[in-house]
Amino acid sequence: MTTHASMRSTHSISVEFPRRASLRLRIGHLALRLTVRKFFDAAIWAHNRRMLPKNVALQIIGRFDLLLAPVRAPRGTKRQRADFPTHRAEWVWNPAVADPPEATTGAILYFHGGGLACCGLNTHRRMVARLSSATGLPVYNVEYRQIPEVHVTQTIDDCVESYRRLLDIGITPERIVLAGDSAGGGLVFSTALALRDRGLPLPRALVAIAPFANYDSTARIAHPNDKLDPVLSADILALPVSWGVRVDGALDPVWSPINHDFTGLPETLIQVGSTEVLLADAYEVAGRCVDAGVSVRLQVWDRAIHVFHAGADVLPDARQAFAEIGTFVSDALARPAISVERTSA
């Protein structure tokens, strides 16, 4: 089902509602609301009262990637490490997909989520392996530097450098798709904007799952989903911003991709849950695309939990979402690329 919505954008946004939530997803939504959301709300309460210091919180979330190292990708999945001077990355691909960099069909450049402060190759390996299967492309999963060790502007530099690596090994830009979830979904747009403004050739398409694209929480605090999200709140998303995005307490609007002109960006697919607090960001991003004349599809999935794609082993909704991504990517790669010239300010 498709409908239209209006927001701060000057144009209407076409919104797709692919399906009703499965019983499993509805049960998961309730279970997480009664457990994970209460845990995060308690953590915010403790942090605000200085009972959970910043350094302790960072130590806890910093272990997420290590703790999930035992989680295996689907049987037969292939992997290959790649090291950079500042960060590392990993090729992940389905055995039916051509080995990189011999893959002339293209590649997915993936930026993992984690609020810019946690997660990495281990937490997202199984998920990006599914993405490879869905798209028929190898996935280049980037473990970019994170806050508070670096500012988000340096994180974006890592993402741009990873894109350059794909170009250097012979993958043409019109065969590259940028994809990411949550904070990584926001980085998809930040990276595309940086590529455009630095005069680099743009990728063929963008895929963003529940993008965290506005580091100012004002819109999320005012959104009704702040109370409905079974996992995240506006307050929990504001924490990493206060830890490592703000400088001397100040938040420059230019650091949020949502505050840029999207003119010239590639066609875009956005997927988000109907009760997610990041629905506010998804609508803002879609509005920027519409205002700039960028082709955009916004899919709102009924009661989908944050990055529900990670539950594809048990959630039919997630498997369908991956199939939608696969169709979008294959259709985008089948169309001739459109060159849009822009003079940077």
Image: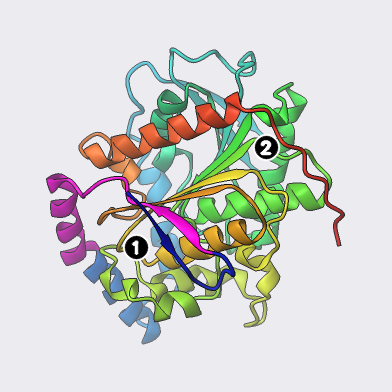
Task: Give coordinates of residue 23: x percent, y percent.
Answer: 12, 47
* Crowding near the residue tagged with mark 1, few <14, some 14–19, many ≥20 C-alpha atoms within 10 Å: many
* Crowding near the residue tagged with mark 2, few <14, some 14–19, many ≥20 C-alpha atoms within 10 Å: many
User: What colouring does the structure picture have?
Assistant: rainbow
In the image, what residue type sits under mark 1? Answer: Glu
> Which residue position is annotated with label 1?
276
Q: Is residue 237 above or below residue 27?
A: below
Element under disc 1: loop
Is 167 on the left or on the right of 33, as rendered? right
Identity of the residue drawn at 43% across and 74% down: 220
Element under disc 2: loop
Identity of the residue drawn at 70% across and 69% down: 254
* 3D distance between C-alphas at marks 1 and 2: 28 Å
182 within the magenta span:
no
Quarter of the image for residue 313 reads top left
Work out whether residue 24 or residue 79 is closer to the camera in this orientation and state it: 24
Task: State which region is magenta.
Answer: 12-36
In the image, what residue type sits under mark 2? Answer: Pro
> Which residue position is annotated with label 2?
203
Q: Is residue 118 above or below residue 77?
A: below
Q: Is residue 111 visible?
A: no
Work out whether residue 103 or residue 92 is closer to the camera in this orientation and state it: 103
